[in-house]
Amino acid sequence: SLAIVWHRRDLRLQDNPALARAAEQFQQVLAVFVIDPAIIGRDDTAPARVHFLRESLAELQRAYANLGGRLVVCRGEPAEQLVVLARTLGAEAVFFNDDIEPYARTRDQKVIEALAGAGVAAHPCAEILLHPAAEVLTGQGKPYTVFTPFWRNWSAKPKPRPFAAPERLSAPSVETGTFISLDELGKPFSGKLLVTPGEQAGIKLLDHFCEAALYRYDERRDHPAEPGTSLLSAHLKFGTIGIRAVWQRTIESWRKAPADRERANLAVWQQELGWREFYKYELAHFPELAERPFRRAFEQFPYDHDRERFERWCRGETGFPFVDAAMRQLNTVSWMHNRLRMVVASFLTKDLLLPYQWGERYFMQKLVDGDLSANNGGWQWAASVGTDPKPLRIFNPSTQARRYDSEATYIRRWLPELAPVDTAMLVESERFSPLFRSRYGYPQAIVEHKSQQQIFKERYRQIHSTE
Ligand code: FAD
């Protein structure tokens, strides 16, 4: 008997429910990845992500071969490709892990129907969330829209354990001529990344983080010059590591923690994994978030549509060193520290008064971990238009820099041309005089923070009063 395992954003053997179930129930398993032009061809699909995907798939092909299995790659519309493959090989079933993004859900429904039409069983497996979205509801049976009560309910539930990888596999011999090589993925990438793609690198990174930084996470996570966070985001995005395996490690680390201080730090990291779940959960319940703000009235927010300002923000030429350093980091290594994602998103929406969707899209064009739910959630949060409404918060880039990069180490790392400038001028850009700016070839400030903040507040108040 033969089953197909259809990989999408679960590029691993360990902790893979679809693979584990297929291998348990069928004598032969063929793994397939379908390159979907509707995803790869989008102009906000970052070359960095295609690179991460290509390298991770290449490693996964080798890992399958080592177990006696096989992973093939084809290109086209997934429903068509899977039906043709299942028919040609006489496969009885297709196993795959679930996804919550609106496009993926429509695609998966089409696949399930097409397979049913061809007499092939489809087995979607719960994978992407620790708890399926329908299982975490308020007392009234409604979805949560605020993080804290969601977290209280969610974190009290016993967590599923990771699935073991199969020890051996058997795959049918298939005509390789009909499949494509990974080089045909397109979108060449010549930049550098902070992380190595692939399952082995994901496992190593988790090990390293648990040993080196987890027990100090809360103390260091907001200081972007320090290696205080896990860098696991691209691995979690592409599923080169499974969320059950990651959670399991937090439980083991909890047991081994020397004292309460380490546990308190660890608990904060668990909560970040909770944010990952929360935004996926929100998108699962409210797919329209991909298109519009959760707070509907804010669709009418009178943003400016100044392209020139936007382009200066993208290039990291706003004249605010903390903002510009962050944009340089994004443009150089396709990743940005979380503290800075909040700072630059606040700056775009509340200082430059530009639509959050512009920044959201630019992030997707660049980020190696670009993920619809986390990115959209982060942008809607920063623009104060999303779920979990916090008191209106506007980040002052200078206050942020003084607090989180007091020695300007991060600023100097990404803006090396400013290395000789006084720290005080870098972290408090109001003190960075026009004369000094010209001397170092650094732009004048694009706007004045205080006055822009007033304009933003006034516009915000008007919309808020219509809610
Ligand atoms: P760690 O601090 O080690 O956290 C561990 C994991 O928890 C992360 O890998 C991530 O999977 C998850 N996580 C942490 N914080 C958040 C959060 N606030 N929201 C959701 N998940 C979180 N994260 C993405 O994975 N993809 C995105 O496209 C993305 N876009 C963002 C856009 C904005 C405007 C903001 C404010 C945040 C965004 N984030 C995004 C969340 C966060 O910035 C990154 O997950 C984090 O910086 C990744 O670094 P890390 O792996 O070292 O995180």
Image (cartoon, rainbow, N blue to C red):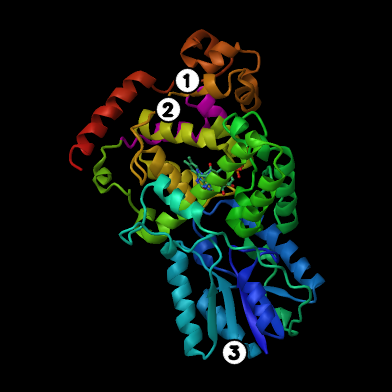
* In front of the other: 163 or 284: 163
In which of the image's four quarters is ligand 1 placed?
Answer: top right
* In front of the other: 193 or 125: 125
Amino acid type, callout 1:
Thr
**SS class of the residue under badge 2?**
loop
* In front of the other: 322 or 135: 135
Residue, disc 1 = 399
Q: Which of marks 1 and 3 is nearer the N terminus?
A: 3
Residue, disc 3 = 87
Label pair 1/2, CB-CB below 8 angstroms: yes
Amino acid type, callout 2:
Phe
Residue 228: tell me if it is visible.
Answer: no
At label 1, counting other C-alpha atoms closer than 10 Å, the crowd grade (few under 14, some 14-19, many 20 or more) is: some
Q: In this view, does 94 lie above or below 151?
A: below
Residue, disc 2 = 395
At label 2, counting other C-alpha atoms closer than 10 Å, the crowd grade (few under 14, some 14-19, many 20 or more) is: some
Could you tell me which residue is drawn at 24 percent across and 45 percent down? 297
Does mark 1 have its CB less than 8 Å from ligand 1? no
